[in-house]
Image: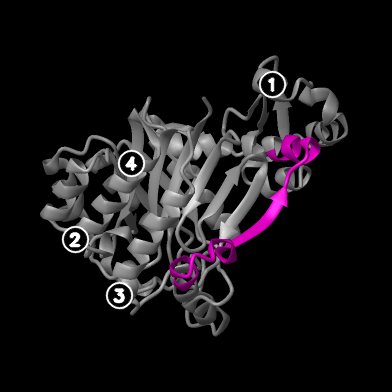
C-alpha cells in the first residue's frame, strides 16, 4: 500500500508578518468554526486507503485558533485515513498564541513535533519585521514545549533581514545552540511583491544587507551548526541525527501528499493541484457540495516532467539525487537521461557526480537557482 503525507492549512493569523506572502488572513476569526467544519468535510470526501506517514499542520498560525479545533481535525484524519502508529505529526506554532494548555492538548492529540517561529533573537528586529512576540516570549514557549514533553522541536530563523549584521547572526547562532533544538530551518529573506516589508524597502525606509554579506551569514550559520553536531541535509535545513523532517524529505523525494484547506497543495496520482485561496468561497463551495469548485489543477505529469522534477527536488538535498533511487523509480539512468544538463553543470563546477549521487558543489549552494533551472 502506498504511503502518503497530509498537509492541513490553517489560514488564520493574529497579525500578518511584514515579510509574509503565504495565504493567511488577519481579522477573520469569525470564520474559524465554519472553516474547520468545511475542512473536516473535505477530509471525509477525500479519504484514501494509503498509509499516512506524516501530517503537517501549517499556516497562517495554527496555534492562533483554539486547540479543540486541532484535536477535531486530527481525529477526523485518523477516522478517515490509515495513520501509521509512528507517523510524524507536526504543528507550527508562534509565541504569543500558545499556552501550557494548548501544548498539552497538542501532545495528547498525538502531535509529536513542534515547529516554533523564532525568526530573530532581538526584540528590535522582531518588531521591525512585524512579529507579535518578544524573544523572551519565544524562550518561554520553547521551555513550555519541553516541559510538556516535546522531544522533537524545530525553530525557524531568517537571515538577511533589514540592517542585520554578521554580529547579529553570531548572536543568533549562539542562542540557537544554547537552547539545543533538534531541528533548525534557516531561511534567507526573500522580498515578495505585495508585502509590507517590500514596500518599506522600495521606499528606502529599510535597507537590506548586501548579497555578499547575506552569503557570509549563511556560511557562518552552516559552519557553526555543523561544528555543534547538526547535519546540513537540505539547502535551508539542519538537524541532529535522526531528526530530519520526514514530511519535507518526502516532498523532496517526490512522495505523494494531500493538502486540505484553502490554498493547500496536493500531489497525488501524478497530478499537482491546489485549493482556492478565499476562505469564504472555500466554505461556501463545501456547504453547497460543489467540491470541485475549490480545486485548481496545475499539472498532470508525464514521465518526462516527473523525471525533471525528481532531479530538481533532489538537488535541494545536500546529498543530492540518489542514482539508484532514480533508476528504481523510472527504470532509467539519470546520468544518461540528463547528460546534456549534467555535462554543462559539471563544467561550471556546480554539481559533482559519484557512483551513488548527483549533488550540488559548495559553489552551487550559493547558485542553486541556476542549477534547478536546468530541470524546469
Residue 201 appearing in the image: yes
User: Does residue 116 appear in the picture of this structure?
Assistant: no
Q: Is residue 307 magenta?
A: yes
Say what secondary structure mark 2 lies in: helix
Instruction: Report the residue at 68% width, 35% height from top.
Output: 310
Q: Position of residue 346 (x, y in %)?
A: 79, 31
How many angstroms separate mark 1 from mark 4 (CA)? 38 Å
C-beta proximity under 8 Å, tags 1 and 3:
no
Can residue 89 be found in the magenta stretch? no
Q: Residues within 10 Å of mark 3 (few under 14, many from 20)?
A: some
Magenta segment? 284-309
Q: CA distance from mark 4 to mark 2?
A: 36 Å
Residue named by callout 4: 79
Q: Residues within 10 Å of mark 2 (few under 14, many from 20)?
A: some
Q: How far apart are labels 4 and 3 at the CA level?
A: 27 Å
Depth order, front residue of 55/296: 296
Q: Nearer the viewer, residue 190 or 2?
A: 2
> Dot 1, crowdedness within 10 Å: few (<14), some or many (≥20)?
some
Mark 2 or mark 1, which is nearer to you? Answer: 1
Q: Which residue is mark 2?
A: 137
Q: Earlier in the sequence, mark 2 or mark 1?
A: 2
Question: For the residue labelled by badge 4, is the local secondary structure a helix, a strand or a loop?
Answer: helix
Q: How is the image coloured?
A: one colour
Alpha carbons under labels 2 and 1: distance apart: 45 Å
Q: CA distance from mark 1 to mark 3?
A: 48 Å
* Most foreground residue, 181 or 78: 78
Q: Nearer the viewer, mark 4 or mark 3?
A: 4
Say which of marks 1 and 4 sits in front.
4
Residue 29 - label: 3
376 vs 49: above or below: below
Which residue is disc 1 drawn over? 323
Distance in Å between CA atoms under marks 2 and 3: 23 Å
Amino acid at each position: 500500500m502506498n504511503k502518503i503525507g497530509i498537509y492541513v492549512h490553517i489560514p488564520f493569523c493574529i497579525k500578518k508578518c511584514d515579510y509574509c506572502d503565504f495565504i493567511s488572513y488577519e481579522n477573520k476569526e469569525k470564520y474559524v468554526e465554519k472553516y474547520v467544519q468545511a475542512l473536516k468535510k473535505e477530509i471525509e470526501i477525500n479519504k484514501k486507503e494509503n498509509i499516512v506517514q506524516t501530517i503537517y499542520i501549517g499556516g497562517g498560525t495554527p496555534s492562533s485558533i483554539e486547540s479543540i479545533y486541532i484535536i477535531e481535525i486530527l481525529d477526523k484524519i485518523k477516522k478517515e485515513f490509515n495513520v501509521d502508529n509512528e507517523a510524524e505529526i507536526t504543528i507550527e506554532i508562534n509565541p504569543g498564541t500558545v499556552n501550557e494548555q494548548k501544548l498539552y492538548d497538542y501532545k495528547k492529540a498525538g502531535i509529536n513535533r513542534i515547529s516554533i517561529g523564532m525568526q530573530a533573537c532581538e526584540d528590535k528586529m522582531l518588531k521591525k519585521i512585524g512579529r507579535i512576540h518578544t524573544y523572551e516570549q519565544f524562550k518561554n514557549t520553547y521551555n513550555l514545549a519541553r516541559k510538556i514533553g516535546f522531544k522533537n522541536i524545530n525553530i525557524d530563523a531568517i537571515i538577511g533581514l533589514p540592517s542585520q549584521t554578521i554580529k547579529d547572526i553570531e548572536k543568533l547562532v549562539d542562542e540557537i545552540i544554547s537552547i539545543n533544538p533538534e531541528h533548525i530551518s534557516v531561511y534567507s529573506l526573500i522580498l515578495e511583491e505585495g508585502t509590507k516589508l517590500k514596500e518599506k524597502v522600495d521606499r528606502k525606509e529599510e535597507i537590506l544587507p548586501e548579497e555578499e554579506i547575506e552569503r557570509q551569514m549563511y556560511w557562518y550559520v552552516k559552519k557553526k551548526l555543523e561544528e555543534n553536531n547538526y547535519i546540513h541535509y537540505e539547502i535551508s535545513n539542519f538537524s541532529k541525527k535522526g531528526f530530519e523532517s520526514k514530511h519535507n524529505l518526502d516532498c523532496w523525494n517526490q512522495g505523494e501528499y494531500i493538502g486540505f484547506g484553502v490554498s493547500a497543495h496536493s500531489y497525488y496520482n501524478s497530478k499537482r493541484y491546489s485549493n482556492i485561496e478565499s476562505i469564504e468561497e472555500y466554505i461556501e463551495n463545501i456547504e453547497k457540495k460543489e467540491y470541485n469548485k475549490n480545486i485548481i489543477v496545475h499539472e498532470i505529469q508525464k514521465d518526462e516532467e516527473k523525471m525533471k522534477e525528481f532531479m530538481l527536488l533532489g538537488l535541494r538535498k545536500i546529498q543530492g539525487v540518489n542514482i539508484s533511487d532514480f533508476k528504481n523509480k523510472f527504470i532509467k539512468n539519470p546520468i544518461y537521461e540528463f547528460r546534456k544538463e549534467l555535462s554543462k553543470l559539471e563544467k561550471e563546477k556546480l554539481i559533482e557526480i559519484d557512483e551513488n549521487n548527483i549533488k550540488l558543489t559548495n559553489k552551487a549552494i550559493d547558485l542553486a537557482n541556476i542549477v534547478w533551472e536546468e530541470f524546469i
